[in-house]
Amino acid sequence: MGFVKGQPKVPGSGRKKGTRDKKVVAMEKATEDGGLMPLEVMLNNMRWGMEQALAISEKKPEEITDDDKMQIGFLRKFAQDAAKDAAPYLHSRLALVDPFARKGDDPDKLDAYDDMDWIERAKEVAFVFTKAEQQLTITARETVRHDH
């Protein structure tokens, strides 16, 4: 007998914990057979593009032609696009942050900051963006350092 609305769940029914779905089983089989996962392809393309661009840019400055400059630009854009495609698989998205909310504030209090000056609010927002920009700069430097 199937599910009956309003009745309790039958003990032992449903998918067992740890059971993999068809999609996961198919991906595991593909990797066992020597196939590459999409993430691996994206990361390999990113690395290849950067390696090629760096190899060209290692020439002496007077030896780099306009065609080389165009090729470097193309390869770096290629690597950047591959990195952009792979990023969601590796890094979680930043959650929306209310720069005015403070720890312990009641979220139902809409007028919690009515007494705060707009200039103070702007300073808080600027502070949040400055911290985010600093973190992105540090991350970019570390990425470049690891690529060399």
Image: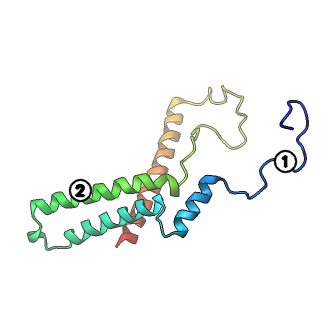
The amino acid on which the numbered mark 1 sits, given as a three-letter code, is Ser
The amino acid on which the numbered mark 2 sits, given as a three-letter code, is Phe
Tag 2 or tag 1, which sits nearer the N-term? 1
The quarter of the displayed image where residue 112 is located: top right
Above or below: residue 25 compared with residue 105: below
Q: Which residue is mark 1?
A: 13
How far separated are the C-alphas under marks 1 and 2?
Answer: 55 Å
Residue 3 location (% of width, % of height)? 84, 36
Q: In the image, is 87 to the left or to the right of 21?
A: left
**Residue ID at (46%, 54%):** 87
Disc 1 packing (10 Å; few <14; some 14–19; many ≥20): few
**Residue ID at (51%, 55%):** 89
The C terminus sits in image quarter: bottom left
71 and 96: which is toward the camera: 71
State the colouring used for the structure image: rainbow
Q: Secondary structure at mark 1?
A: loop
Above or below: residue 68 compared with residue 92: below
Q: Which residue is mark 2?
A: 74
Residue 54 location (% of width, % of height)? 26, 69
Q: In the image, is 123 to the left or to the right of 80?
A: right
